[in-house]
Amino acid sequence: MRVHQTSLGTVRGEAVPDSFVVSPDSRRFAYVSGRASTMKEGILGRRLEFIPRDAFVVLDGVRGPEWPIVASDSIVFSPDGKSVAYEAARDRRWFLILNGVPTGGYDDIAPEPPVFSGDGSRVAVSALSNRRWHVYINGQGSSGYDAIGSNTLRLTADGLRMAFGAKSGSKVFIVVDGNEEEAFDATVKGSIRFSPDGKRVAYAGRRGEDSFLVIDGDKHGPFEAVMEQNPVFSPDSKHVAFAAFAGGTWRVYVDGQGGPEYQAIGADSVCFSPDGRRIAYVAKIGNKWVLVADGTEQKRYDAIEKYSFSPDSRHLTYAARSDTKWISVLDGVEGKTYDGVSGSPLFSPDSQRVARVTLKNQHWHVVVDRDSGPGYSGVDVHGPAFTPDSRHIVFAVKDEPGMFPVIDRQEYRGSSYDSFLAAFAFDGGALHTIAGRAREVFRLDVEL
């Protein structure tokens, strides 16, 4: 395999920190540049710590048109990487710029990025017009409300369905496909979810001291609390699970049926296998944590890190801490011990190989099939990536003289960079990523 480096140009002007965005296919990049202004009270209602004035967006190294104000947190690529959108203001009016074309002229736009549908065909924003907040999808506005819930806007993969949180007077409710659902005092953060096939919808709300989970219009509860970022749909859309607190204990409910009682459930730990037939989560018993897989408790540890199902759903691996040492666990069997771990373990597409990032004797390793390989000063936070045929693995590390790619343990130290801005992603017969050196940005293509 060979690594090709293509310069995408130098960073222009005063690039805004943390505004760099890379497309999901790791082939395109964008950022905001301009005269920086630190804002305490925001501009036109937008509350951000950092909004550049006399600004422009640089897309794939090409400078776009200048705007008096660009929201530096608003750049987003569509899932297929073909479209890009951001928000900018001129003459006290906010606009959505989609592929270079401005639309809108709103009184204000919510301080969050636009939302694309999964197929990239539609894009939506929450915006203020005539003193009422609306959700605009491809320029078409919803009914007006006193407020739209922050980061509640959801589109299905095909963009044909939409849901968001809204407020009118003292009522707070979810709007699904233009219809106002039952009113609550508040909604639970991150709870609005469409199933992968877009046919089902669920969310959580609070009324007084009680919390409820609504699935396809059916209300479950009351509970004392529903965990944030719940519920979770299975990949086949047939099942739904959530964690809730009642009577002093936490339980995971699958299709409305409650599981065993625990002191706590790990945040964001409820997960279905890819085929939707298995479920696992992390629970607390006394001062120990345990992985519960398919209703069966595994060994108890002091801590458990993120776990992963294999693509064929047959295997389950995670890292667990016992005292000061971390242990790799695969299908309940303990493996090697380490001083630390980083990120989630990664299975190969054929489910036969597994890679994880570990710390041993002050050096970081990418362990593949229990082979630790050489140690480095650091491993890129985006972690390793397998090729689609599962035969090769690529990742970036930090060591002298900088950061460089490693492919099947072969080091490409001659291609040294200051940072890697994205994970390696497969597209068009090659793996791609974006890296930076000084003020120059490069796309790296790994030929298979």
Image: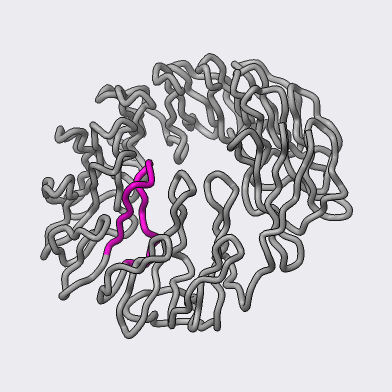
Q: Is residue 34 above or below residue 264?
A: below
Q: Name the chief secondary structure element in magenta.
A: loop
* Residue 318 on image: x %, y %: 60, 28
348 vs 364, nearest the viewer = 348
* Residue 213 on image: x %, y %: 23, 38
68 vs 175, nearest the viewer = 68
What colour scheme was applied to this rendering of the protein? one colour
Residue plotted at (11% across, 49% down) = 180
Residue plotted at (37% across, 66% down) = 101
Give the quadrant of residue 11.
bottom right
Please give left or right for residue 146 compared with residue 260 in the image. Answer: left
Quadrant (top left, top right, bottom left, bottom right) of the N terminus: top right
Q: Is residue 318 above or below residue 313?
A: below
* Residue 86 on image: x %, y %: 42, 64
The answer to whether residue 119 is magenta is: yes
The residue segment tinted magenta is: 110-126
User: Do we see residue 249 in this rendering?
Assistant: no
299 vs 382, nearest the viewer = 382
Residue plotted at (36% across, 74% down) = 46
* Residue 187 on image: x %, y %: 25, 51
The answer to whether residue 156 is magenta is: no
User: Do we see residue 37 in this rendering?
Assistant: yes
Please give left or right for residue 30 compared with residue 171 in the image. Answer: right
Q: How many marks?
A: 0
Quadrant (top left, top right, bottom left, bottom right) of the C terminus: top right
Give the quadrant of residue 270.
top left
